Amino acid sequence: MNVQNLMTDLERKHPGESEYLQAVREVLESIEEAYNEHPEFEQAKIVERMVEPDRIITFRVTWVDDAGAIQTNLGYRVQFNSAIGPYKGGIRFHRAVNLSMLKFLGFEQTFKNALTTLPMGGAKGGSDFDPVGKSNAEIMRFCQAFMLELWHNIGPDTDVPAGDVGVGGREIGYMYGMYKKLAREYNTGVLTGKGMTWGGSLVRPEATGFGALYFVQHMLQRAGRELKGATVAISGFGNVAWGAAKKATELGARVIAISGPDGVVYNPNGMTDEKIAYMLELRASNRNIVAPFAEKFTDATFISGKKAWSIKCDIALPCAFQNELTEADAEELLANGTWCVAEVSNMGCTPEAIAALQRAGILFAPGKAVNAGGVATSGLEMTQNAMHISWAAEEVDAKLHYIMNSIHEACVKYGTEPSGYINYVKGANIAGFMKVARAMLEQGVV
Ligand code: 2IT
């Protein structure tokens, strides 16, 4: 493979799809060497096939807001790759959603899902619907209108959506209700992230954050470091940030920052149960601001317009959005003595930021390894649904531990460089790629 030629070709075919092109370039650059050791991949044009989604479904979503005005949004489902299992991946509701964003997320999901050890292909979907400031009734009507179009294309053995940014338990509930009405079947396995009384899995709400901290624990253990006593800066305050803050605190770290689009909350004394619970309230308010945290808890300070990375910390955990940690942020973290950055958001760091962190030789791991606990637990939810049973929290948590450990091991296996430095980006990309590539090869040209 010649990465530059492939990228030039993709840039020509998909002009302006910057997030998608960024995600593809990162993977191709890091797998190039391993790929070229397999002439059978080259002959079967595996990479040329893998960078294009199997199919993209786009649709219009029309709904009526509380004022009686008609609203039109765009809806998408990108079914990226089904070599190792049915399509699986979240749905994102955010005003900036476009095809490039969902293609990048679907591409990443393919490798991430391969790392989980479970049989799941890659997909992503969403809409440019902006949940900020919407009433509960508006969110319900939007979710119903979205599902009215999507339902034909999904199913427990076809494509299984879940939540992502802007889509949590409430939205999954509204979408499931509409799916059930249209399909006239109680197919619990068609969506994951469901409520506990109707097919949801214990630990799924916490799983992305919990899994991330289990992964960080493995990284630290290998490097002879400890979470106990370490200071942690987290960006975001949504579901993923909440799970990460909860587990980091449980494991003895001090979470000294959370952030929102409005600024950062400096929280020098760390989290309490009450503070962690309040993060959920903040999210549910649909206002998308973090400042009220510092009004409620007076030992915390709100700093307007600043990012979480301006707070001096040992460990930085991006938990919000793609490209939220830039090269300048990486330099600021390094200058402040940060020794570990783990992406919990998908593609949370820009390529320049990753290069700076790796150059400095600190611990760095990419989202597709660190945040895979979320979709892995979705996979466990699908298993429970198929078996018509539900496991105890301890059982799900033990399986999540096992999965995060095996992802870490895979990264070490494929990512250890001659110097001994573990390039987790390379490790995760090669490990995920190999599994999908072999499956595609064995299934012929389809
Ligand atoms: O990015 C992700 O892995 C998710 N949003 C979770 C996807 C899922 O199917 O649970």
Image (cartoon, helix red, strand yellow):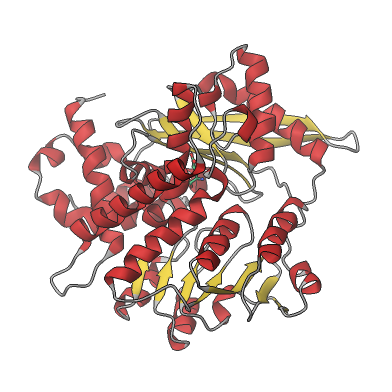
Residue projecting furthest to the right: 67
Question: Where is residue 30, by image quadrant?
Answer: bottom left
Q: Is residue 321 found left or right of 427 in the rendered image?
A: right
Measuring 61% from the left and 63% from the top, which residue is drawn there?
Answer: 236
* Callout count: 0
Return the x and y of residue 41 as percentages of the image width and height. Answer: 15, 40
Q: Quadrant of the C terminus?
A: top left
Measuring 43% from the left and 41% from the top, which residue is drawn there?
Answer: 395
Residue 411 visible: yes
Return the x and y of residue 47 as percentages of the image width and height. Answer: 24, 42
Question: Where is residue 246, by image quadrant?
Answer: bottom right
Measuring 61% from the left and 34% from the top, which residue is drawn there?
Answer: 196
Residue 320 visible: no
Q: Is residue 58 above or below residue 355?
A: above
Q: Is residue 288 above or below residue 151?
A: below
Q: Is residue 379 found left or right of 200 in the rendered image?
A: left
Question: Where is residue 428, by image quadrant?
Answer: bottom left
Q: Nearer the viewer, residue 88 or 266?
A: 266
Return the x and y of residue 91 as percentages of the image width and height. Answer: 56, 40
Q: Is residue 104 found left or right of 167 in the rendered image?
A: left
Return the x and y of residue 371 as percentages of the image width and height. Answer: 44, 53
